[in-house]
Amino acid sequence: MQLLDGAYQRVKRAGIHLANLKRRSNILWQKKRGAVVIPRKPATFLLPDGRKIKGVLGSAAFPIGPTPQIFSILAGEVIYNLRASLDYLVYELAKVDSGYVVDRTQFPITFRNGMHIADTLQQLKLDVTQTLDMFKPEFQR
């Protein structure tokens, strides 16, 4: 098993969910597109120069309806799997940097007191550049 296999599997799974979401939204769009209604009625239009012309007045009605619940579920799965892949990455970085398994590691998503990623990584005492160099063969897959 390679160092980043878990992260790659999570990204792959996110891609599967995203493809499913795109497929479903395309199907929904095709169904709805055929349901566009344009009621028309004869009308007389007044032009800026004072002339009147006869024409047809119409407006499009697009029945949207509620979004299927599966859309939000799939979007959540995509986000969850991408977040998990970042957690795998931080876990492996911490393990390689320290030489042993570091418990309770995760990618910093929220920050307190104005901290940024660089501050958080500094706090973890990770030499990111040196550690990332160890992963270069992994990134080139």
Image: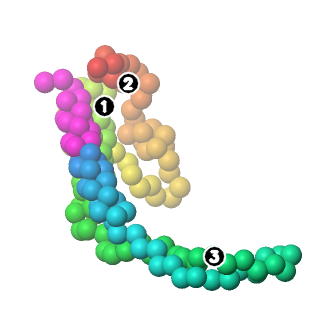
Q: Residues within 10 Å of mark 3 (few under 14, many from 20)?
A: few
The amino acid type found where label 3 is placed reads Gly
Q: Which residue is mark 2?
A: 132
Q: Position of residue 29 (x, y in %)?
A: 34, 60
Visible in this render: residue 107? yes
The numbered mark, 2 or 1, whose residue comes first in the sequence reads: 1
Q: Which residue is mark 1?
A: 93
Asked if 80 appears above or below 55 in the picture, the reply is above
Could you say whether the residue bearing mark 2 is in a helix, strand or loop? helix
Which residue occupies 71% across, 80% down? 45
Front of the two marks 2 and 3 = 3
Judge from the rendering whether residue 103 lies leftward or rightward of residue 116; answer left or right: left
Q: State the extent of the magenta-drawn residues as a range.
A: 1-16
12 inside magenta stretch:
yes
Are the residues tagged 2 and 1 within 8 Å (C-beta)? yes
Q: Position of residue 92 (x, y in %)?
A: 26, 32
Residue 22 disc label: none
The amino acid type found where label 2 is placed reads Leu
68 inside magenta stretch:
no
Which residue occupies 31% across, 54% down? 26
Which residue occupies 26% across, 45% down? 19
Asked if 52 appears above or below 67 in the picture, the reply is below
Of residue 28 and residue 129, the one placed in the foreground of this image is 28
Q: Position of residue 130 (x, y in %)?
A: 41, 21
Judge from the rendering whether residue 128 lies leftward or rightward of residue 82; answer left or right: right
**From the image, which quarter does the N terminus lie in?**
top left
Residue 55 disc label: 3
